[in-house]
Image (cartoon, rainbow, N blue to C red):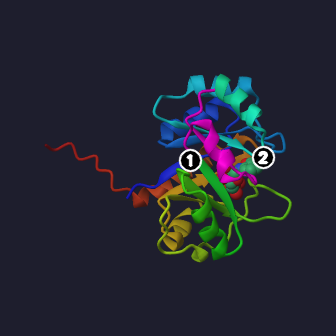
Amino acid sequence: MNIRTKICGMTRVEDAQFAAQLGVDAIGLIFFAGSKRCVTIGQAQTIVRAIAPFVTVVGLFVNARADEIEDVLAKVPLDMLQFHGDENAEFCRQFQRPYIKAVRVQNRGDIETAAAVYTDARALLFDAAVSGQYGGTGQSFDWQILPSTLVRPWVLSGGLKPENIVSAIRQSNALAIDVCSGVEQAPGVKDKQKMQDLMSAISIFSTRSVDSGC
Ligand SMILES: O=C(O)c1ccccc1N[C@@H]1O[C@H](COP(=O)(O)O)[C@@H](O)[C@H]1O
């Protein structure tokens, strides 16, 4: 089992490049003015140009207008969209891009409802529910609330950090994680050591072999 990993809220080229070198599967760029990690189109273009191909670039939006998202898509080559607000399925599916829908989890019903509604989402992303905030809170939720089987691919998120990631994966059986504030030294400024510690911690789940034998 290899844990698919996204590190979100990149604002600096050096952080995105370092994450890519560590082997993350995806980086997230936040286009939401309410976030301390919000990037301009110019910043996003610079980051995307600087990272290696085959690292998925995810654009995160919160209740943006469709024309705002189209404008970003016309200028920044995003591979995937992440909707972290109150967007409905019809809205999410209009952009001809795979999308992730964030669900702020309070109870198991939230998960079941989202799975029934966002039927074409590439994945659901389960985050903590914090009153008045959409995400990036550093808060986790009760991982044991997650059902043992779920028909849709899903991503574990919310308050994940090097210190709790192994326990989070063990308790939730997550195959994919999204980490933002837990690997920062300040909002939008990633911490190299924390990113390294995170990737090192999840490497215990890796089944990738470096055996060069034929
Ligand atoms: O990070 C933000 O500023 C943010 C703002 C608004 C919506 C989502 C945001 N980030 C996403 O929130 C989750 C959890 O973040 P954290 O690890 O608890 O800090 C994650 O998916 C981020 O992509």
Secondary structure of the residue carrying numbered label 2: loop
* 154 lies left or right of 183: left
Residue 47 spot, x, y in % from top left:
63, 28
The picture places residue 181, in percent across and down from the top left corner, at 70, 52
Q: Is 157 within the magenta? A: no
- Residue 165: which quarter of the image? bottom right
* Numbered mark located on residue 63 in the image: 2
**Residue 83: in magenta span:** yes
The residue closer to the viewer here, 119 or 27, is 119
**Residue at left offset 76%, top offset 32%:** 68
Query: Is 55 situated left or right of 207 in this image?
Result: right
Task: Find the residue positioned furthest to the left.
Answer: 214
In the displayed orientation, state which residue is furthest to the front: 90
The span picked out in magenta is 76-98
Mark toward the viewer: 1 or 2: 2
| Residue 159 rendering spot, x and y as whole percentages | 68, 61
Return the disc, 1 or 2, that comes first in the chain's sequence. Answer: 1
Question: What is the secondary structure assignment of the residue under circle 1?
Answer: strand
Determine which residue is flagged by label 1: 6
Amino acid carrying label 2: it is Asn
Q: Between 185 and 102, which is closer to the camera in this rendering?
A: 102
Q: Callout 1 environment at 10 Å: few (<14), some (14 to 19), or many (20+)?
A: many
Q: Quadrant of residue 30?
A: top right
> Is residue 183 visible from the viewing direction of this image?
no
11 over 183 or under it: above or below: above
Rendered image quadrant of residue 64: top right
Some atom of ligand 1 lies within 8 Å of the CB belonging to the residue at label 1: yes
Badge 1 amino acid: Lys
Answer above or below: position of 119 versus 98. below
Q: Are marks 1 and 2 in contact (CB under 8 Å)?
A: no
